[in-house]
Image: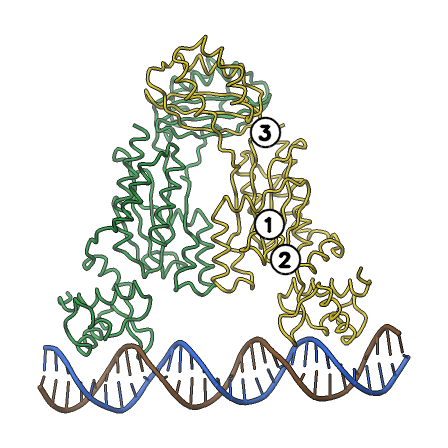
Chain colours: A yellow, B green, C blue, D brown
DNA sequence: TTTAGCACTCGATCATCCGGAGTGCTAACA
DNA sequence: TGTTAGCACTCCGGATGATCGAGTGCTAAA
């Protein structure tokens, strides 16, 4: 357990380093208002903190920087839940009172404002439509052999896919089938559709509809949803502003990672409720070893819909990002609920 | 007019500089197979070429690099229409024989392969649905006051938008209206819909449908298409590999530009048929003054659908990019035609 | 007209040299 | 005993200067 004095020194080092990105010396610390002892004492304490693993020295005769453990301790115990800047809060509120009627637009905008206010890269996963319920199914023929299947969920999400109409299947039989599917499947969660289809509807379909086997293949095609929620990033170029990525090579690794949506999804997806902070090597991926990821889930009616998060250097303004994410998840959830009633 | 010898020297300088990214000296040029004169002669000629504005010298006692004019001359007169690498051609062909049934997927993949093969950033605009014709209109109610309008075009493009149902408008009157709209508007190009609506349908609607004024507002909302085609980029991080962007600041300017979709659209949109090459300052935007943009339009049944292009440093492998774009636009147009019949 | 030779220029690289910031240790002090 | 002032030492970073090599421009010879 750290003494109160050690804690205030650790806090000082972390906060100074976060805002100035340079190793923090004993004099700098002792000059802070919340530290009353002299530089020499600070030196002794810093030496102890280094031994305990909370601080690191880039080289002898340089100041100290926080280790991953140091950041962790700071996030877990030392961070005061700083109030958001009024202007930031205002920006968030203004966003959600403005007219955003499309889901995609809402999320894109949220990502945008998040990256704008933090100067880090923001990433939003989802929303996961998988749990949504089928509202309506429709097939619109384009040509003899082509059609568009449209699937609307109770949340107003529209999923479309182009399907090939098997030979020998008539328009009227498709219509018949769609009607049947609508009456039997409406209200079910999307991930149950196929299951239900096979278990309960095969008999009925084979009785009512001609060319049953071909149709089944077509339905199968129709209900193959893309399970992966979409990924929205914003402010990817912000990494280029961070001094830790002044070296193009390092920046490149990170930017390339951001272009691979599956990796990003894996990195950010989080099942835990609430805000999650992963610092440095706590992320498994080596490329983000000197990055931190802060993520939160947004919900609708208690159902977790997706993840919203920030990627930045380990030297990140945790206080600000966390309080911003707290506000944003609540407001986003609210907004989505209002949108979907 | 340049002499044959001057041309071969200019070609040599451009090609050497393209592949090595360093000022080209007289010795290097005279060692090439297509230049038979000595280094000293080359020096004299290069001096002339500089005076004519085709070459530049970063500083005295450095080699020469092509000026924008030099690249332009090279592209217009000196480039031999080099055969594509067999492996590249194969990759393109493989892409289009693979199963891609969604429009968006097709385009995303095309962009991907383009950036992969060139190591530059690829950008695809469109497809422009504006000229497409209405196939089918559908409104699916979600709640009392909310609905999703779905608009399918003859090319199978699906456009959706969430609409608010005005108070006092019944479900049945909406249904009635949609039927009327479908029968009257189907087959029309999207950009004529509104016009036609106001000119010919107001009377009929007011006769057949209750609460006519509210409905009109709603229809208006429905037919407000996003005119801007979507933008797909791929390989944005490739700029970070180019030696001209070793400096993070320069890279940042470009990457930020790539994040602004409207600027990108403006930069790439091209009405001219065929392949267009814009070198350096020929682009109006200052941020891309040392970049070149090569773009081409892809078509369907002769109708220009959208633009496909490459953004890279002025020192770009024009031959390769141009031949690649030639193949790709043809294949993409073919593929889309097959897709839409 | 072309080429060989030569002096000259200039950037890149490397070693060297401070200056400053910061530490660790010791001794004095409360 | 804990705290502080003082001091020698370390190390980084920027400035300076020497050297090297690539490349040019000019001149004179072929």
Q: Evaluate if marks 1 and 2 touch, with contact meaning CB atoms under 8 Å apart.
A: yes
State how far apart marks 3 and 1 are (Cα): 25 Å
Q: Specify the subunit that label 1 lies on.
A: A
The quarter of the rendered structure image containing the C terminus of chain B is top left
Residue A113 spot, x, y in % from top left:
58, 47
Q: Evaluate if marks 3 and 1 touch, with contact meaning CB atoms under 8 Å apart.
A: no
Label 3 secondary element: helix
Dividing the picture into quadrants, the one containing residue B78 is bottom left
In the rendered image, the vertical position of residue B57 relative to residue A249, given as above or below: below
Residue at image position (73%, 57%) is A73
State how far apart marks 1 and 2 are (Cα): 10 Å
In the rendered image, the vertical position of residue B262 relative to residue B203, given as above or below: below
Q: Would residue B87 appear left or right of A172 to someone viewing this image? A: left
Label 1 secondary element: strand
Q: Would residue B210 appear left or right of B98 to someone viewing this image? A: right
Residue labelled with disc 1: A310
Residue labelled with disc 2: A316
Nearest to N terminus: mark 1 or mark 2: 1
In the rendered image, the vertical position of residue A277 relative to residue A128, given as above or below: below
Q: Specify the subunit that label 3 lies on.
A: A
In the rendered image, the vertical position of residue B335 relative to residue B322, given as above or below: above
Q: Would residue B5 appear left or right of C30 to someone viewing this image? A: left
Q: Specify the subunit that label 2 lies on.
A: A
Residues packed near mark 3 inside 10 Å, few (<14), some (14 to 19) or many (20 plus): some
Nearest to N terminus: mark 3 or mark 1: 3
Nearest to N terminus: mark 3 or mark 2: 3
Residue D28 spot, x, y in % from top left:
14, 91
Residues packed near mark 1 inside 10 Å, few (<14), some (14 to 19) or many (20 plus): many
Residue labelled with disc 3: A131
Q: Relative to the observer, which residue lies in front, B302 or B341?
A: B341
Residue B309 spot, x, y in % from top left:
33, 48
């Amino acid at each position: 357990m750290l003494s109160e004095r050690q804690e205030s020194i650790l806090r000082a080092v972390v906060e100074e380093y976060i805002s100035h990105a340079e190793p923090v010396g004993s004099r700098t610390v002792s000059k802070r208002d919340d530290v009353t002892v002299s530089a020499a004492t600070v030196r002794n304490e810093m030496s102890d903190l280094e031994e305990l693993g909370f601080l690191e020295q880039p080289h002898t005769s340089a100041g100290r920087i926080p280790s991953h453990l140091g950041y962790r301790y700071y996030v877990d115990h030392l961070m005061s839940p700083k109030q958001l800047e009024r202007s930031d809060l205002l920006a968030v509120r203004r966003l959600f009172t403005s007219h955003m009627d499309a889901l995609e637009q809402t999320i894109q905008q949220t990502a945008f404002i998040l990256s704008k206010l933090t100067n880090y890269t923001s990433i939003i996963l989802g929303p996961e439509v998988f749990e949504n319920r089928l509202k309506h199914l429709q097939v619109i023929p384009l040509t003899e052999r082509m059609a568009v299947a449209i699937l609307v969920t109770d949340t107003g999400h529209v999923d479309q896919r182009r399907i090939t109409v098997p030979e020998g299947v008539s328009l009227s039989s498709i219509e018949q089938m769609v009607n049947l599917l609508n009456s039997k499947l409406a209200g079910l969660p999307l991930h149950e559709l196929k299951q239900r289809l096979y278990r309960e509807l095969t008999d009925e379909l084979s009785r009512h509809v001609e060319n049953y086997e071909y149709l089944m293949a077509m339905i199968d095609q129709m209900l193959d949803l893309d399970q992966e929620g979409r990924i929205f990033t914003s402010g990817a170029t912000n990494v280029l502003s961070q001094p830790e990525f002044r070296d193009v090579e390092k920046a490149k690794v990170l930017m390339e990672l951001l272009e691979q949506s599956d990796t990003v999804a894996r990195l950010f997806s989080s099942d835990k409720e609430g805000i999650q902070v992963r610092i440095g090597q706590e992320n498994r991926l080596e490329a983000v070893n000197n990055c931190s990821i802060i993520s939160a889930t947004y919900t609708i009616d208690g159902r977790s819909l997706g993840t919203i998060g920030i990627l930045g250097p380990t030297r990140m303004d945790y206080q600000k990002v966390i309080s911003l994410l707290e506000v944003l998840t609540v407001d986003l959830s609210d907004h989505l609920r209002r949108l979907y009633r």
